[in-house]
Amino acid sequence: MAETRISAGAWSARVESDGCTLRSVEHEGRPLLSAPPELDWTQGHHGAVLAPWPGRIIDSRYRYDDLEQRVPVNEPAFGHSLHGFVFDASWQRVAVDAASVTHEITLGNKPGYPFEMHLRVTYRLDEKGICCESEWKNMGRGTAPFGLGFHPYLMAGGGVNDEWMLHVEASVSSDSDPLTKRPMPPRPTDATSDFVTPRRIGGERFSRAYGRLARHDGLAVVRVTAQDGFTIELSVDEGFRWLQVFTADVPSASLARRGIAIEPQTCPPDAFNSHEDLQRLAPGESNRASWFLRIASA
């Protein structure tokens, strides 16, 4: 494992080469992300890169170009495959300076994913906060399916997230069934239950995909506000068409509900089967997307 520390003004961050994992972000010494003290993917994929699919492939199988593919099961209790192949892989650090670090990885011919994809992720700090820039390119000979996500857990304050306010501007949402982890059919968002108007999280437990995101100057913004009014904003450019929100109901008592996952995603869960916003990249075709973490008053 190799950890890189970067800083700019009042901001600092740590990025691990294993999984290209964003381990921490701080502003004036105040931690803005929840994470275990050591890398532990069983506790909720804190800070992970999710590719070539975010969320689950249900039943660990899909059809692409009339061929059925089976990917390894890594959720044996449900039989699904979660978050792709790169969150626990060794990435290569290819560039670093005081305020930024870039990692790359080439993903090729994995079980159930007979495609070759090159990924490049840069974390960059400035006086406003942190920017994550991602690029991917199909290096293979055939058209390849692809989806990308990131898994930061925002921490607006101390204690559990029940007293925090959440605001997500979107037109559709889809919950994951808590018993089967299967995504439910998308539905129009409800102003009283979906946090499209700011309200307290309370004791609600959910993992919910939001789509048709409202945008302002090209960015969709999620806000998490602590009781003292301290507000963190995560924004995504048009490369990310979905946001997965998870109330951090993880096994570890020290991490459970100590943050809230706001996950930028290019597609919703199980897109390899639904084909909803699933990218099909021709040989040599590339794409990119960025997300940003700021403090509302910074």
Image (tube, helix red, strand yellow):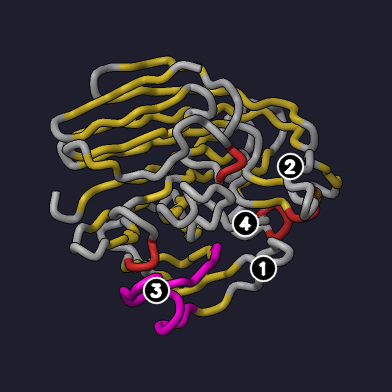
- Find numbered disc 3 in the image and state the secondary structure of the residue it sits on: loop
Report the magenta stretch's main SS: loop
- Find numbered disc 4 in the image and state the secondary structure of the residue it sits on: loop
| Residue 132 position in % (x across, y down) | 36, 37
Query: Which residue is under mark 4?
Result: 269
> Is 248 situated left or right of 107 in this image?
left
Which dot marks residue 177?
Answer: 1
Q: CA distance from mark 4 to mark 1?
A: 12 Å
Which dot marks residue 195?
Answer: 3
- Find numbered disc 1 in the image and state the secondary structure of the residue it sits on: loop
Q: CA distance from mark 3 to mark 4?
A: 20 Å
> Is 259 situated left or right of 106 in this image?
left
Task: Choose mark 2 or mark 4, whichever is in front.
Answer: 2
Query: Are dots 4 and 1 in contact, CB under 8 Å?
Result: no
Pick whichever, 148 or 19, lies toward us.
19
Asked whether residue 105 appears in the rendered view, the answer is: yes
Q: Residues within 10 Å of mark 1 (few under 14, many from 20)?
A: few
What's under tag 1, amino acid-wise? Asp
Q: CA distance from mark 2 to mark 4?
A: 15 Å
Sequence-wise first label, 3 or 4: 3
Query: Which residue is under mark 2?
Result: 74
Q: Is residue 67 above or below residue 29?
A: below
What's under tag 3, amino acid-wise? Phe
Pick whichever, 251 or 215, lies toward us.
251
> Is 69 situated left or right of 130 in this image?
right
Q: Is residue 240 above or below residue 111?
A: below
Sequence-wise first label, 1 or 2: 2
Query: Magenta span covers which residues?
Result: 189-207
